[in-house]
Image: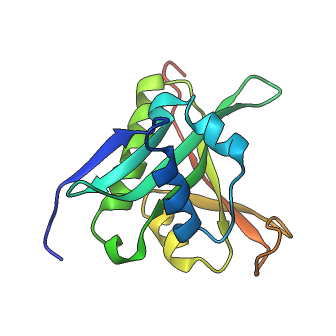
Amino acid sequence: MTRGRIELGAITPHNIKQLKRLNSVVFPVSYNDKFYKDVLDVGELAKLCYFNDIVVGAVCCRIDTTDDGTRRLYIMTLGCLAPYRKLGIGTVMLKHVLEYCSKDGNISNIYLHVQINNESAIEFYKKFDFEIIETKEHYYKRIEPADAHVLQKTLQIKGV
């Protein structure tokens, strides 16, 4: 496939069904209605990714705050249709998240869960300095393997 145009776009009530369809194809787990309702409220933290005007990927995140007030960004989903992998689409989506965190300046780390046998995803995140910090047994329900690695990238908080 030749080099194409990769662009990010907002997720709106008018295109949320495209996100649902994409997630049902890309991920082995299904997401409930609350997930999609929440995605509509996070603005820049949820984006569809277009390759030559075709939806081929999406990234959906949220900000979590720990008991001590530390803010962390959780990547709920970041995925791309199989025929469009290795074209830089995942990189564009992850760089968008990294830029968001950099502009915010008050997010201590980015983390996500990856099924332990998803070696291509693990290698992708390691290229961006994510590390496996934990393995959660029985994290997933109704899929095998059920265990997930927690990957994390520590960020520099502005002014610290």
**Visible residue check, residue 49:** yes
Q: Nearer the viewer, residue 110 or 13?
A: 13
Q: Is residue 92 above or below residue 3?
A: above
Where does the C terminus fall, quadrant-wise?
Answer: top right
Q: Nearer the viewer, residue 127 or 17?
A: 17
Q: Residue furthest right?
A: 138
Numbered circles on residues, count: 0
Q: In the rendered image, which quarter is residue 130 located in?
A: bottom right
Q: Is residue 120 above or below residue 56?
A: below
**Visible residue check, residue 73:** no
Whether residue 108 sits left or right of residue 46 in the image: it is right
Q: Residue furthest top?
A: 159
Residue for point 80% across, 24% down: 68
Whether residue 57 sits left or right of residue 33 in the image: it is left
Residue 94: percent from the left, percent from the top? 42, 50
Q: In the rendered image, which quarter is residue 128 located in?
A: bottom left
Residue for point 70% across, 45% down: 33
Where does the N terminus fall, quadrant-wise?
Answer: bottom left
Residue 107: percent from the left, percent from the top? 57, 30
Residue 59: percent from the left, percent from the top? 48, 49
Residue 85: percent from the left, percent from the top? 36, 72
| Figure colour scheme | rainbow
Residue for point 58% across, 65% down: 24
